[in-house]
């Protein structure tokens, strides 16, 4: 199991993500995140829990560089993101895989194109990666749907496609925002097992979820957000895998 | 169906949707602007040709007004002047105008006068000048003065300057109109880019968050609008060629009016239009997209 992510408990230089006294507000509104300090060790697996509006998505946005903190320091892979040059940000993002809450699949592209997108953006040649993409789509159970456009996919298929896109370039950390919110219990378990498998391969995982049952049964630690503040919760039961 | 998908034969899809509903309108507007720019260019070329023709005509001729000396008849003074001028370097032809021509020239001011021959009407000598090394007005005057001929040489420089100035103004106005149209096209493309970025915000966001650089995304919009503008430029230039060809066929080498003589070769001048339109659109889209993408960060 991963070490305790609360600040000051481990060697900070190795951490994939490090927050120090980070707060965030939208515009002139109230702070949605307050004085967060924690770190995620490489290869760790955490859930991010909390009620609606607690700031789970905002926290993930800070990690995948879609938002900026109003206060505090964020380090990604040892880089202080506040001082990262604009040209460095794409390189940092390529090390992060994200499964967005609303998936953000590109409707004009086939499932295969969607899954291959990060590799194309990174400048890879189709001949070098198309077999890997096909293999990955088969791994998430979409080998028969490679040609399909996202609007024709079922909810679970879309979720799995979004996961395939998020992991296709072997990111060091995978962030997933409510990845099981629109699927039934069995599909949620299948998706969870995908994450476990990725974690076994060395990817750091952080999953924002409302699914307390899944968190409880998973035996994984969680970061619990409430009123903008973070608390670490130890695993509540045996590991589900 | 799904079994037919072969990853080995996969060709990457374009990053941006290939067609947008606004494309037709954009092509129409840019095509109209390109048509206007091309027609302007044709008009300037025709006006320039007409001006150069007139200037050449004026530059190759001089008119000498001869006044008889005491004891000399106007005709003999004109004949003597013609003889002297024929020997000046840079003169190719000399022709003393007949008295009747001189009377006709003054008739608009004097009306029909019965004994016009009794009036001291000066005689005119038309001098043809060498196109390459024309004799100057000073040289002609000097030659006449040495032989004691009272004459004024008009080398048409006053008219020539006016014609050249008019041609310069036509060229300048054409350039201004052309630049205005190019600016309007750039503004239209900038608006379209802005709208395109707003419409494709999700795509831009996904590309960004997947690690695409700003310049990579801006280039997608740049290429897209350059392609649309090139098509519009082709349509506009084609329309201008058609219009020019119709004018040339209807009016012959004189066009519809001698002031705008269109040559077939003029029509070639519009050929760079698609490239220019694409370049203007690419620049406008790049600048607009670059700025907007930075804002979206």
Image (cartoon, coloured by chain):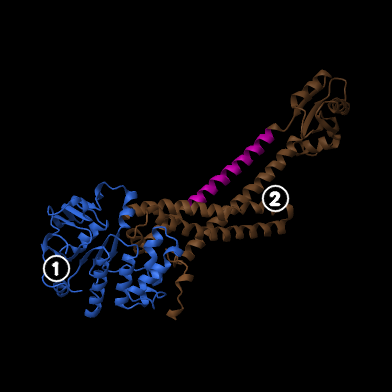
Q: Eyeballing the image, is B218 above or below B52?
A: below
Residue A102: percent from left, percent from top: 28, 69
Stretch in magenta: B158-184
Looking at the picture, tell me which residue is in the foreground, B81 or B271: B271
Looking at the picture, tell me which residue is in the foreground, B208 or B101: B208
Q: Eyeballing the image, is B186 above or below B141?
A: below
Parent chain of label 2: B
Chain for colour brown: B
Label 1 environment density (alpha carbons within 10 Å; few <14, some 14–19, many ≥20): few
Q: Distance between the residues labelled 1 and 2?
A: 80 Å
Looking at the picture, tell me which residue is in the foreground, B261 or A40: A40
Q: Does the magenta stretch include residue B178?
A: yes
Give the residue at mark 2.
B261
Q: In which quarter of the image is the C terminus of chain A?
A: bottom left
Looking at the picture, tell me which residue is in the foreground, B197 or B66: B197
Residue at x-position 32% and y-position 59%: B209
Residue at x-position 36% and y-position 54%: B292
- Per the rendering, the colour in which chain A appears is blue
Instruction: Find numbered disc 2 in the image and state the secondary structure of the residue it sits on.
Output: loop
Looking at the image, can residue B113 be seen? no
């Amino acid at each position: 199991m991963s070490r305790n992510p609360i600040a000051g408990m481990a060697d900070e230089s190795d951490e994939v993500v490090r927050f120090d006294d980070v707060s965030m507000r939208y515009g002139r509104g109230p702070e949605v995140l307050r004085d967060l300090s924690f770190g995620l060790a490489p290869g760790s697996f955490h859930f991010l829990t909390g009620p609606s509006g607690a700031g789970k998505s905002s926290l993930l946005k800070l990690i995948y560089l879609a938002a900026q903190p109003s206060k505090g320091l964020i380090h990604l892979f040892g880089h202080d993101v506040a001082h990262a040059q604009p040209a460095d940000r794409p390189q940092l993002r390529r090390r992060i895989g994200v499964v967005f809450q609303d998936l953000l699949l590109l409707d004009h592209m086939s499932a295969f194109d969607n899954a291959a997108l990060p590799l194309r953006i990174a400048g890879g040649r189709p001949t070098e990666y198309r077999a890997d993409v096909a293999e990955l789509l088969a791994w998430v159970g979409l080998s028969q749907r490679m040609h399909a456009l996202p609007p024709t996919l079922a909810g679970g298929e879309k979720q799995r496609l979004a996961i395939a896109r998020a992991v296709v370039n072997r990111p060091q950390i995978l962030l997933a925002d409510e990845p099981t919110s629109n699927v039934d219990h069995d599909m949620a378990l299948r998706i969870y097992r995908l994450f476990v498998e990725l974690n076994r391969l060395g990817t750091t995982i952080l999953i924002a979820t409302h699914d307390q049952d899944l968190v409880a049964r998973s035996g994984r630690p969680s970061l619990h957000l409430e009123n903008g503040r973070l608390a670490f919760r130890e695993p509540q039961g045996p590991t589900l895998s | 169906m799904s079994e037919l998908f072969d990853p080995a034969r996969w060709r990457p899809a374009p990053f941006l949707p290939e067609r947008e509903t606004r494309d037709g309108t954009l092509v129409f507007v840019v095509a109209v602007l390109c048509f206007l720019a091309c027609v302007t260019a044709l008009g300037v070329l025709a006006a320039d040709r007409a001006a150069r023709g007139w200037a050449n005509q004026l530059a190759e001729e001089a008119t000498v007004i001869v006044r008889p000396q005491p004891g000399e008849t106007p005709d003999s003074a004109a004949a003597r002047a013609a003889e002297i001028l024929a020997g000046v370097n840079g003169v190719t032809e000399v022709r003393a105008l007949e008295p009747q021509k001189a009377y006709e020239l003054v008739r608009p001011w004097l009306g029909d006068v019965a004994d016009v021959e009794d009036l001291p009407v000066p005689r005119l000598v038309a001098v043809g000048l060498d196109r390459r090394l024309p004799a100057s007005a000073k040289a002609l005057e000097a030659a006449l003065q040495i032989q004691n001929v009272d004459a004024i040489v008009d080398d048409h420089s006053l008219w020539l300057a006016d014609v050249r100035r008019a041609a310069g103004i036509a060229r300048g106005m054409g350039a201004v109109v052309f630049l205005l149209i190019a600016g309007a096209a750039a503004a239209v493309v900038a608006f379209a880019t802005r709208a395109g970025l707003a419409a494709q915000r999700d795509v831009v966001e996904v590309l960004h968050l997947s690690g695409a650089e700003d310049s990579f995304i801006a280039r997608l919009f740049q290429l897209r609008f350059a392609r649309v503008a090139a098509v519009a430029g082709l349509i506009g230039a084609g329309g201008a060629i058609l219009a020019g060809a119709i004018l040339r066929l209807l009016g012959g080498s004189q066009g519809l009016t001698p002031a705008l003589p269109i040559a077939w070769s003029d029509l070639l001048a519009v050929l760079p239009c698609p490239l220019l339109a694409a370049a203007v659109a690419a620049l406008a889209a790049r600048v607009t997209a670059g700025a907007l993408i930075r804002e979206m960060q």
